[in-house]
Image (cartoon, grey):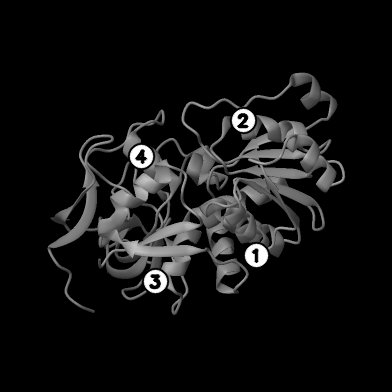
Amino acid sequence: MSEIPKTQKAVIFYENKGELQYKDIPVPEPKANEILINVKYSGVCHTDLHAWHGDWPLPTKLPLVGGHEGAGVVVAKGSEVKNFEIGDYAGIKWLNGSCMSCEFCEKSFEANCPKADLSGYTHDGSFQQYATADAVQAAHIPKGTDLAEVAPILCAGVTVYKALKTADLEPGQWVAISGAGGGLGTLAIQYAKAMGLRVLAIDGGEDKGTLCKELGAEVFVDFTKSKDIVSDIQAATNGGPHGVINVSVSEKAIEQSTEYVRTCGTVVLVGLPAGAVARAQVFGAVVKSIAIKGSYVGNRADTREAIDFFARGLVKSPIKIVGLSELPRVYEEMEKGAILGRYVVDTSK
């Protein structure tokens, strides 16, 4: 194992919406309960944009190194760490650590812990060459795994897999994925297919339609061309999808999902557009007996299962690899909604 340097390259900002600086910063030292990961690759998530903007009702740590889809190699560990060894592959998730003793942690709702520590938000994340993570929450990645390919699974994959479990659907039932052409949506299509579900993908543009079909969507509905999206979706699914996974950041799309979902179906909220409100007609929601649920990332078991789907070749994130120094440009594309699939940054460039 090579010697750990004192400094490293990172992208850091000192105020919300401030300059994203690619510069040298100190390499952190792991606490007794932490591992130090030499991050090789990190996925770029829409949440990273919110952290930079500071537009969620949760204050960010400042200054901050963002990122929470980091995949790399353990190069050091604290004195209390028993579940990782030097040289192991490990992943940095959104949930960096939790108290493990409150009622939510006891019931495996660790992400809902009031003392949750969040990578790339309240804890410096994976847009750096070396990052720390609580060993209890860090993800175990099988040796030999392609670290660039697995990086998006650590947040996007886990998040949509948990959302599909929250929808509680049966094989052969329809699931609609709103925002299907993005980083989360493309993975949601594949997880849904692997779970035996029929997929209707919703997004805008021919490129996204082609991608969604290639990944396994049975039907693609282009919201930019549909004149009556509710009727079109209900017709394509013979009465509406049994479940809807909302990974888009459109308030209108969320409202529409409560209209086209099948009677007794479930609408799952995943995407977090700043300041948005989930609207539903009360009469329709009651008469159709629909359920509206929020799904927030996943726990350790969800992570292990989501990575296992990937390791068995059942899901693969369509990625574009760029250098860490190019992260500001990626943020610009994300703000424009121009990203197809998911960007992954190579921390060595």
Residue 217: image quadrant is: bottom right
Q: Is residue 182 left or right of residue 189?
A: left
**Residue carrying label 3:** 89
Specify the quadrant that holds the N terminus.
bottom left
Relative to 140, residue 289 above or below: above
Q: Is residue 147 left or right of residue 22?
A: right
Q: Residue at x 55, y 67 (%)?
A: 316
Q: Position of residue 10 (x, y in %)?
A: 22, 55
The answer to which of marks 3 and 2 sits earlier in the sequence is 3
Alpha carbon of mark 2 to alpha carbon of mark 1: how far? 27 Å
Nearest to the eye among marks 1 and 3: give it: 1
**Residue carrying label 2:** 252
Alpha carbon of mark 1 to alpha carbon of mark 3: how far? 30 Å
Q: Nearer the viewer, residue 140 or 130?
A: 130
Indicate which disc residue 214 carries. Answer: 1
User: Regarding mark 3 in the picture, which secondary structure is present there?
Assistant: strand
Relative to 76, residue 263 above or below: above
- The amino acid marked with disc number 3 is Tyr
- The amino acid marked with disc number 2 is Lys
Nearest to the eye among marks 3 and 2: give it: 2
Residue 336: image quadrant is: top left
- The amino acid marked with disc number 4 is Ala
Alpha carbon of mark 4 to alpha carbon of mark 3: how far? 26 Å
Alpha carbon of mark 4 to alpha carbon of mark 1: how far? 32 Å
Residue at the outermost right position: 238
User: Regarding mark 4 in the picture, which secondary structure is present there?
Assistant: helix
Alpha carbon of mark 3 to alpha carbon of mark 2: how far? 41 Å
The answer to which of marks 4 and 3 sits earlier in the sequence is 4
The answer to which of marks 4 and 1 sits earlier in the sequence is 4
Q: Position of residue 349 (x, y in %)?
A: 25, 66
